[in-house]
Image: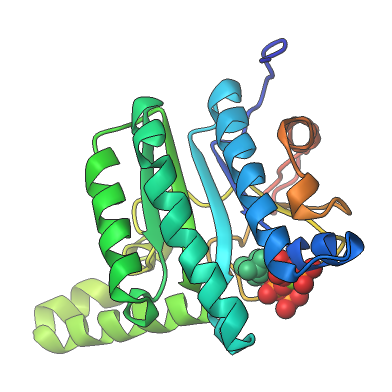
């Protein structure tokens, strides 16, 4: 239920979904059960984001470093992504959600890449909420690929070189994998860890950070709303004096 309207709602909320393995372990189950249950939390957060007027919800689903997990877990996670996307696609579309995946897609399998393309094409026209799944993503990967593209462009012609040299921070933003997406206002990490684990290093420069003890599979609408309330009380100064 959407309770009274909240003021100062963040435009872009980002979640570092952590603690699935521990959630499963606490119940004497395999880690993958935590990942399955975590999909329910994603569903709840999408609904809560729409209800509260958040325009961008992004989720860190799989880092570049996560490729170093046991093969069995990586395979299960990739299978789960295909399944969840295929199952949710129509509902997302009906609810006006635009779906995007950002990350090093060259490392993803064909079937997952096909499902992602299908889901992105189907929902491209929606504008109630943009849901971004960061998959095979890392902040350093993103900055490096942006720097490479920029260097390539600089070689194009002396004029192009001059143009790039004179551009500001916004100019570099355009080379990032997140081009066109506003920087996250709020980044929430679950499971009690207070680190970024190579997430949105450039884009998160002025994000408000919230670290909560709740494990991701237990993070539902109520917790999402509490995070928005936390955000509404922040005073963002951007280095200035107020
Ligand atoms: C987050 O949960 C999901 C991914 C990183 C893919 P974890 O799998 O990291 O769970 P913990 O941190 O081991 O409990
Ligand atoms: C961060 O979680 C990555 C994602 C949530 C996708 P990890 O569980 O991989 O992070 P570390 O290893 O504890 O830093
Ligand atoms: Mg973890």
The quarter of the rendered structure image containing the N terminus is top right
Residue 39 image offset from top left, x and y in percent: 60, 49
Residue 199 image offset from top left, x and y in percent: 60, 69
Residue 49 image offset from top left, x and y in percent: 58, 32
As drawn, which residue projects farthest toward the top? 4
Q: How many marks?
A: 0
Q: Judge whether residue 56 can be spotted in this image.
A: yes
Left or right of 61, for residue 126 = left
**Residue at 18% across / 81% down in the picture?**
153
Up the image or down, 192 lies above or below 71; here it is above
Left or right of 226, for residue 123 = left
Left or right of 222, for residue 153 = left
Q: Judge whether residue 65 can be spotted in this image.
A: no
The quarter of the rendered structure image containing the C terminus is top right
**Residue at 37% across / 49% down in the picture?**
86
Q: Nearer the viewer, residue 154 or 133?
A: 133
Up the image or down, 66 lies above or below 208; here it is below
Ligand 3, by image quadrant, is bottom right
Place residue 98 in its image quadrant. Answer: top left
**Residue at 38% across / 82% down in the picture?**
107
**Residue at 79% across / 37% down in the picture?**
223
């Amino acid at each position: 239920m959407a309770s009274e309207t909240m003021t100062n709602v963040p435009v872009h909320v980002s979640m570092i979904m952590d603690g699935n393995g521990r959630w499963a372990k606490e119940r004497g189950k395999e880690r993958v059960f935590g990942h399955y249950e975590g999909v329910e939390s994603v569903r709840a957060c999408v609904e809560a984001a729409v209800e509260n007027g958040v325009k961008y919800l992004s989720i860190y689903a799989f880092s570049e470093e996560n490729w170093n997990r046991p093969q069995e877990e990586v395979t299960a996670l990739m299978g789960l992504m295909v399944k969840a996307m295929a199952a949710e696609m129509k509902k997302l579309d009906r609810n006006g959600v635009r779906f995007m995946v950002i990350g090093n897609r060259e490392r993803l399998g064909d079937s997952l890449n096909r499902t992602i393309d299908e889901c992105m094409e189907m929902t491209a026209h929606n504008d109630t909420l943009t849901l971004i799944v960061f998959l095979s993503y890392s902040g350093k990967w993103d900055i490096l690929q942006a720097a490479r593209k920029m260097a390539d462009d600089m070689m194009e012609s002396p004029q192009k070189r001059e143009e790039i040299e004179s551009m500001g921070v916004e100019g570099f933003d355009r080379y990032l994998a997140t081009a066109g997406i506003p920087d996250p206002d709020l980044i929430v990490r679950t499971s009690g860890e207070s680190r970024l684990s190579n997430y949105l290093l450039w884009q998160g420069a002025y994000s408000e950070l919230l670290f909560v003890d709740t494990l991701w599979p237990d993070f539902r609408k109520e917790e999402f709303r509490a995070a928005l309330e936390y955000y509404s009380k922040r005073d963002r100064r951007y280095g200035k004096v107020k």
